[in-house]
Amino acid sequence: MMTNAKEIRLVDLDDDGVDRAFRADVLTGLAQGQKAIPARWFYDERGSALFEDITGVSEYYPTRSETEILESRGAEFAELIGPGRAVVEFGSGSSVKTPLLLSAIKPDAYVPLDISGDFLRAAAADLSAKFPHLSVYPVEADFTKKVELPAEVASTPKLGFFPGSTIGNMVPRTAVDLLREMRKTLGDGAMLLIGMDLIKDTDVLEAAYDDAQGVTAAFNLNLLERINRELSGTIPVEKFRHEARWVDIFARIEMHLVAQEDVSFTVSGREFAMQAGETIHTENSHKFSKRSSNTLLLAGHWTPVEHWTDARRRFSLILANASIPRSAP
């Protein structure tokens, strides 16, 4: 029982209980020449659980690398961030890294935001048990838009926490938009602790998104299963395969679902067809240098304060201050 938690739900549902944004994104994306569905829709309850499984496979280094930073730099976090903030975690998932941060900085409150309500509630309950004196306010919401935070933390200075390099899932324009929305959500005087994956050898990158056990493939294909289940889809999932590829010009891994033969199907009563070899683009994972990460943050109205990396320099955590938007240099 979450005796120290208050749940808030901000998801817009149709009369049939389906997230309106999910339906709109899928129908719009499947109608495009290059079919594409935003990566945030991976995270239904099963997708969220599969992603947690991905973080444990040997090829997937980001979680281990980021955890190493969180475990080793706690004193530095505490000094730069200070106590008494409300930690607002964007896309909290299972919040497995969060206890390391909360233990280091001693916040007044924790506000996990996630679009997967069932997973969010389970994770919030677990964290409440670990920190019984911490006020927890789980908010089921699409954090890519400005979120009204609980009134209980309105006057508390905020620390945004965005681990896992989720920012890399977005093209630069969308990433900047998101950072600006985070700036609005968190308000003046806020700080942001954000994970960004670093550029490295192609073999290491592609293996991380196409593990030998096939967990990432199952995660990718689960998006089609979700569409069939929630949007009355008839997609022949068995006729698609997972593919991960490095695209150097964009400095990113792309994940696709490839039709292995000609297929036709319906989603929410609309008809679609794909030829053999045609793909649904489901995820980008951009990789950064120190300079490119700084540029992105500054464009999003955040001023970098400190960068940390793991011992193998594969992953970075960056602390930034909310900056005042300017119209000129």
Image (cartoon, rainbow, N blue to C red):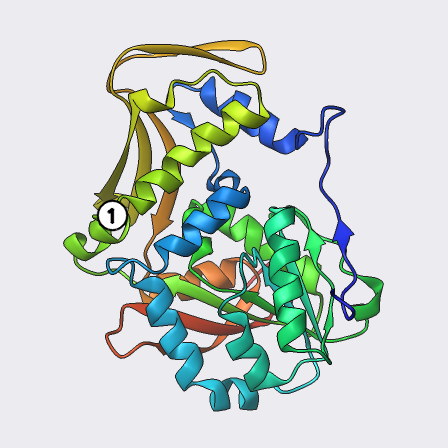
Q: Give the percent coordinates (x, y) of residue 309.
A: 34, 76
Q: In which quarter of the image is the C terminus?
A: bottom right
Q: Quadrant of residue 196?
A: bottom left
Three-letter amino acid code at the position of disc 1: Gln
Question: Residue sitting at 50 percent across and 63 percent down?
Answer: 298
The residue that label 1 is drawn on is: 213
Residue at screen point 38% across, 54% down: 53
In this picture, is 118 found above or below 288?
above
Q: Position of residue 181 (x, y in %)?
A: 63, 53
Asked whether residue 307 appears in the rendered view, the answer is no
Q: Is residue 307 above or below residue 182?
A: below
Query: Image quarter for residue 223?
Result: top left
Looking at the image, can residue 19 be seen?
Answer: yes
Image coordinates of residue 81 in percent, x first then y, are: 59, 83
| Number of numbered discs on residues | 1
Which one is in front, 85 or 18? Answer: 18
Q: Nearer the viewer, residue 314 or 181?
A: 314
User: Is 8 in front, or is 198?
Assistant: 8
The percent coordinates of residue 306 (x first, y second) are 45, 79
Q: Identify the residue at horizontal 76%, vertical 57% (top origin).
A: 7
Q: What element carries label 1?
A: loop
Quarter placement of the N terminus: bottom right
Apparent side of residue 119 relative to residue 196 in the rendered image (left or right):
right
Name the residue at 77% across, 53% down: 8
Q: Residues within 10 Å of mark 1 (few under 14, many from 20)?
A: few
Q: Residue furthest right?
A: 151
Residue 294 in which image quadrant: bottom left
